Structures are given as C-alpha cells and as structure tokens.
Image: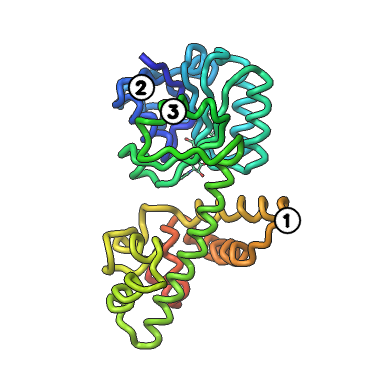
Amino acid sequence: MTRIAFIGLGNMGGGMAARHVAGGREVNAFDLSEAAVKKVVAAGAFEAGSVANAVEKADVVITMLPAGPHVRKVYDEQILPNAPKTALLIDCSTIDVDSARAVASQARAAGFRFADAPVSGGTAAAEAGTLAFMVGCDEVDFADVEEALKPMARVVIRAGDHGAGQAAKICNNMLLGISMIGTCEAFALAERLGLAADRFFEIASKSSGQCWSLTTYAPWPGVGPQTASDRNYEGGFAANMMLKDLKLAQEAAARAGATTPLGAQSEAIYQLFDRLGYGGKDFSGILQMLRGELSKLKA
Ligand code: NAD
C-alpha cells in the first residue's frame, strides 16, 4: 500500500488528505493544529505527531502549507533530514517561484525527486478530489507525480521544470482576478444603463465578452449557475486568497521585469476590499463594492 505523508491539513489539505484515504492509501498526517489533525484522523488517517514521524517511511510526501517561508522551513528542518531518499516530494502549496526553485534545488542536492504542484479549485474541489494540478518537475518524474496526485485530481498538467507549476498558477490567478473585476464592472455599468442583469448575462455569455468569471462564476446573484454570489458571497474563493496570489504575481513581475499594469490595479482593488473588512468574502463580492452597495455584504 502506498504510504503518504501529508503535512498541512487546513481548509485545503484536510480534504486532500482524506481523498488519499478514500483511494486506499495509508496516510500519516501532521499539522500544527490539533483540530485539523483530528478531522483527518476521523476520516481514516494516522496521527503522526510530528513531520519527522510522518515522513519517516513515506513513499510520497505532500505539503499543503500557507506560504513560501513555511515550505522552506519545513523542508529544510524536517522533511529533507528525515524522509527516505526514495520518497517523491510534492509541494502543493501556492508559493513564490523563487521559493519553489530554492526548495527544488535543495531537495535535488540531497538526492530527492521534487515537484511543485499548486492547485486550481477551492475547498469543494479538494473534498471531491477534482482539483487541477499544475506541475513543475523533471520530465522523467512526471508519470510518478501524476500517479501520486491521482486521488485528488480532475486533471494533472506538467507546466515545465521546477517552478513552472507556481508560475502557471500565479499567471492563471492574475488573469482570473483581472477578468473577475472586469466582469463586475460590466454588470455595474449595465445596471446604471438600465440593462437587466439576466439580459446582459445571456447576451455577453454568447458574445465576445464571454469568460469563465461571467459564464461559470457570475458575480451577480440569481444569474447563471449557482455560485458564491447566491450565498451572499460566502464560501468559494476568499478575496484575501486572491489578494495573496495577486501579490505573488506582482512580486514575480517586478523581479522578471514583466509589464502587468492590470495585475497591479487588480491587486490594489483587492487590497482595498480586504482593508474594508471583506477579505473573507468570496472574490466575486467586489461587485458590491463597485456598485456602491457594500452594506449588502456583512463583514
Ligand atoms: P490553511 O491556512 O487553512 O491551512 C494551512 C495549514 O498549514 C494550517 O492548518 C496550519 O496549521 C498548517 N501549518 C502551518 N505551518 C505548519 C507547519 N510548520 N507544520 C505543519 N502544519 C503547518 O490554508 P489553505 O486554505 O488550506 O491553503 C493552503 C495552501 O493552498 C495555500 O498556499 C493556499 O494559497 C493554497 N490554495 C488555497 C485555496 C483555497 O481555496 N483555500 C485554493 C487553492 C490554493
């Protein structure tokens, strides 16, 4: 039976670890939060007690941690000194490209195979095992990475070498942030022009303005498929998570010398939404700020 060490059992990692249990794998789980560990143990995982214990006999080590510094520290101090060299190491957190490349170099220098494999899809996809993975790894390792990720995945795509998975994730989410704000602005303008939201939705969905933020994730309640906007912007993809990804994109753009003015503007808009106290709301809640109807959202 494949032995998985799963480190980081938060909103995403908890559901992801449970998918491995459901897929018939042995999961040795660790998180700093006891409550998070308890949930996964209730789903059938073993409580490892420490990262060292979790990785000791692992075939695959998966991390799902908040940010780059957490990943660097856990790899440097706990995973690399304690995992068997045969273990395949996969970081699924969303982190900066530099940290992903630094951890990859360190892991390879220590004799390990490593992949950065951030995900698209929120907690519902984590629980359902329908995440999309964007992978940066050596080509020769990809088949094993894909097999390891299978219980959690709808699709696994190799983006390129180490760091390319993170690059794909921040480029995708910068595009999503920009397109969601554009969609919200269009609904707000349509309203001021006296155009009914459902009419605008139907027309733009079949015209050149069509995009995922409109057709699949409409920010206007009551039009299109059920989304977070129909639940007063609860659940879904939190605006402060979008802000995190937009910050990563701007940091990467500054370092790489890329020109991303709309990305910068999107970061500023989400920063404002967050400072106003709505960072926990779904990222499509920006609509209500643009309409001047923030009072409709309870902070
Ligand atoms: P979270 O804060 O709910 O979970 C992170 C977990 O890591 C926490 O339970 C925390 O206790 C644990 N942790 C921190 N340091 C640790 C350490 N040293 N050892 C062990 N455990 C430690 O965050 P999340 O929403 O699950 O997100 C995790 C990652 O996935 C982030 O990088 C995020 O950007 C990314 N992501 C999140 C979503 C989403 O919708 N929530 C979607 C896609 C990607």
Q: Is residue 221 visible?
A: yes
- Residue 182 image point, x, y percent: 48, 70
| 284 up-or-down from 147: above or below | below
Circle 3 is placed at which residue position? Answer: 34
Q: Residues within 10 Å of mark 2 (few under 14, many from 20)?
A: many
| Quadrant housing the N terminus | top left
| 52 up-or-down from 19: above or below | above
Q: How are the residues colored?
A: rainbow
Quadrant in the rendering for residue 287? bottom left
Give me the disc on residue 257.
Answer: 1
Label 3–label 2 contact, CB within 8 A:
no
Residue shown at 54%/14% (left/top)?
86
Left or right: 104 in relation to 210: right
| Quadrant housing the C terminus | bottom left
- Residue 29 image point, x, y percent: 43, 23
Left or right: 122 in relation to 275: left
Q: CA distance from mark 3 to mark 1?
A: 43 Å
Circle 2 is placed at which residue position? Answer: 45
Q: Nearer the viewer, residue 128 or 44?
A: 128
